[in-house]
Image (cartoon, rainbow, N blue to C red):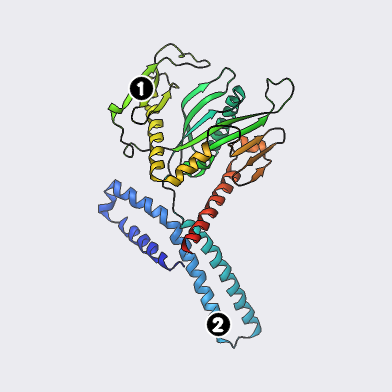
Amino acid sequence: MFDNLAVFESRFNEINEKLYDPAVVSDPRLYAELMKELKNITPIVEKYREYQKAAAAQAEARELLDAGGLDKDFREMVEQELGDAKKQMETAGDELKILLLPKDPNDDRNVIVEIRGGAGGEEAALFSGVLFRMYSMYAESRGWKVEVLNVNETELGGYKEISFMITGEGAYSRLKYESGVHRVQRVPETETQGRVHTSTATVAVLAEADDVEIDINPTDLQIDTYRASGAGGQHVNKTESAIRITHLPTGVIVECQDERSQLKNKDKAMKILRSRLYEAKQREQDAQLAEERRSQVGTGDRSERIRTYNYPQGRITDHRIGMTVYKFDDMLNGNLDEMVDALITADRAAKIEDSMEAQA
């Protein structure tokens, strides 16, 4: 079933030859494109060669057994080699199926994460702060950079909303599964009766859009300045450094007041605007993705949740894959890989199943 993969090997060899061509080396754009393509197909070629090697070993063992005339010890050895080669083929074949799945074109992009307090008032805002800390620590553990773009704090130190960029290789590929409503069950510090309250926060993970992909006409923008507001800070309410950008054709509104500089706030707001418009463009191009995002993010109501963080029981449950972990503090301290890996595996399994049904 992998016979047509020879085309990848041919292209792999062709690119390697071109990378030694002085004309290619002197063209930074072309060189970068070829290196990116090489990076994408190398795992496929390596796994295909592994599959071919196992297939050749299996064929050789089968040929020896079919020829007959082997003594007992040698026959047992060949049978063992046949079994090993078969297992290696199956393993390499399964891994090839995953590698050949259509790649999400956004997987290598940086992301803009937006967290907003949902149902639950101040407790929801405080939970938004917990999620921001969790993602920040996860980013740090993977060597990614975090830059706050906009924040609207509450008096108790929570966030009505916070937007931040995470820059690093593969950021979108691992964080895209975090989009949705996150529900928390815990006893608030202000609760005198010891009752468990349920609150929510919404998380939206947007792929950062390049300037060339989203062409924004300056005449389509309404830019307003105002004085920053919030729970504190020396520059709050002193200068009109905060920026509000309205994209008139779509009605998308972006605000940024995190920086003292009006120009810096405008630059950050434009990054968020481009990413939101890029996401809207994707929704238009792919109706299935649009439905998936709507079902993930929803309205922030308590019933529309992808994950529950239960403090009294010390458990975190992802409702999409039915996975519950009791490494509560671990996960809130940014150790998300176990959950993320499970979500990636489930997503790949579903795509493989869809691919097999399409071929049937």
Q: Earlier in the sequence, mark 1 or mark 2?
A: 2
Q: Residue furthest bottom?
A: 69
Q: What residue appears at the point 53 percent right and 53 percent down from the top-left corner? A: 350
**Residue 107 visible in rendering:** no
The percent position of residue 185, horizontal first and vertical second, equals: 66, 31
157 is higher (above) or lower (below) than 76: above
258 is higher (above) or lower (below) than 307: above
Question: Which of the 4 image quarters holds residue 2?
Answer: bottom left
Q: What residue appears at the point 40 percent right and 12 percent down from the top-left corner? A: 239
Which is nearer the eye, 89 or 280?
Answer: 280
Q: Kindly identify the amino acid type of the residue bearing the numbered disc 1.
A: Leu
168 is higher (above) or lower (below) than 98: above
Q: Residue furthest right?
A: 193
Q: Kindly identify the amino acid type of the residue bearing the numbered disc 2.
A: Leu
Secondary-structure class at tag 1:
helix
Instruction: Identify the residue position indicated by label 1 in the image.
Output: 263
Which is nearer the eye, 257 or 350?
Answer: 350
Q: Mark 1 packing: few (<14 Cα in 10 Å), some, or many (20+)?
A: few
Instruction: Identify the residue position indicated by label 2 in the image.
Output: 64
Q: Which mark is residue 339?
A: none
Q: Residue furthest top?
A: 238
Q: Is residue 41 left or right of residue 91?
A: left
- Judged by depth in the image, the label closer to the viewer, 1 or 2, is 1
**Residue 44 visible in rendering:** yes
